[in-house]
Image: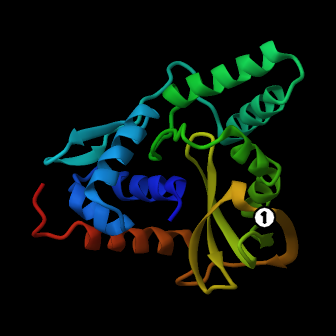
Amino acid sequence: MRRADRLMTLIRHLRGGDLHRAADLARATGVSLRTVYRDMETLAASGVPIEGERGTGYRVTAAITLPPLNLSMAELEALHVGLAAMRQAQDPDLAAAATSLATKLDGVLPEGDTPRALAVYPFADAARGFQHLPKMRSAIRARQKLSLTMDRDRTVRPLQLEYWGRLWTCIVWCDTTRKFDDLRIDQITACRVLPSLFVDEVGKRLSDYRRLRAREDEAFVAPDHQP
């Protein structure tokens, strides 16, 4: 598992707010305790609101808000597209300002129920995914299937976009693999809206995904595990 993917996996386990032992996190990600300790330090330094310490356990606390400004998903998308463009500017002052602003935003952006930024993700990686966001948002509203090219060609039902700070993911039901997936937008190389629509089907809805995740979280936090 790549380090960036491992950090994302750790946040998924922690975002429920429960206390998790480092040993359990190490087992879930297939790494050593020392690696988990380093990952926790990296996440905390990147702005993720982590509480805990070695020998006690870790949890993600409530996200910090940015009063009085509240951004919609569309406004956030526009902001990051603009920053991506400015970072590629020939003017070194503008490029430096865009990088600095992105770093500052990572520290204070409100995420609602979603954990905050992962500053470890390269800006260029996120920028590659921005081009697909308008199509994906439109497909979610219209309930249209998408044809995606990434690790393999997939036909998916897009259900919800999530923002992780410089990184967007999309919860989908994948008709190709016949299961739910949480896809990183920056890993998509081609995105095509298909003419076919999809309707709610039991076992393939966003509510089904959330119930599945809740069961997985309950199974991960075993009753006999004490911090």
Please tell me which residue is depicted at 35% across the width and 72% down the height of the picture.
Answer: 216
Query: What sort of colour scheme is used for the picture?
Result: rainbow
| Residue nearest the viewer, comparing 97 with 18 | 97
Vertical arrangement, residue 225 with respect to residue 40, above or below: below
| Residue nearest the viewer, comparing 76 with 88 | 88
Spot occupied by residue 184 in the image (x, y as percentages of width and height): 64, 59
Q: Is residue 41 left or right of residue 227?
A: right
Vertical arrangement, residue 78 with respect to residue 16, above or below: above
Looking at the rendering, which quadrant does residue 226 occupy?
bottom left
Vertical arrangement, residue 147 with respect to residue 160, above or below: below
Looking at the rendering, which quadrant does residue 187 occupy?
bottom right
Looking at the rendering, which quadrant does residue 206 occupy?
bottom right
Picture quarter with the C terminus: bottom left
Q: Is residue 211 left or right of residue 145?
A: left
Please tell me which residue is depicted at 78% across the width and 64% down the height of the picture.
Answer: 142
| Residue nearest the viewer, comparing 30 with 117 | 30
Question: Mark 1 highlights which residue?
Answer: 142
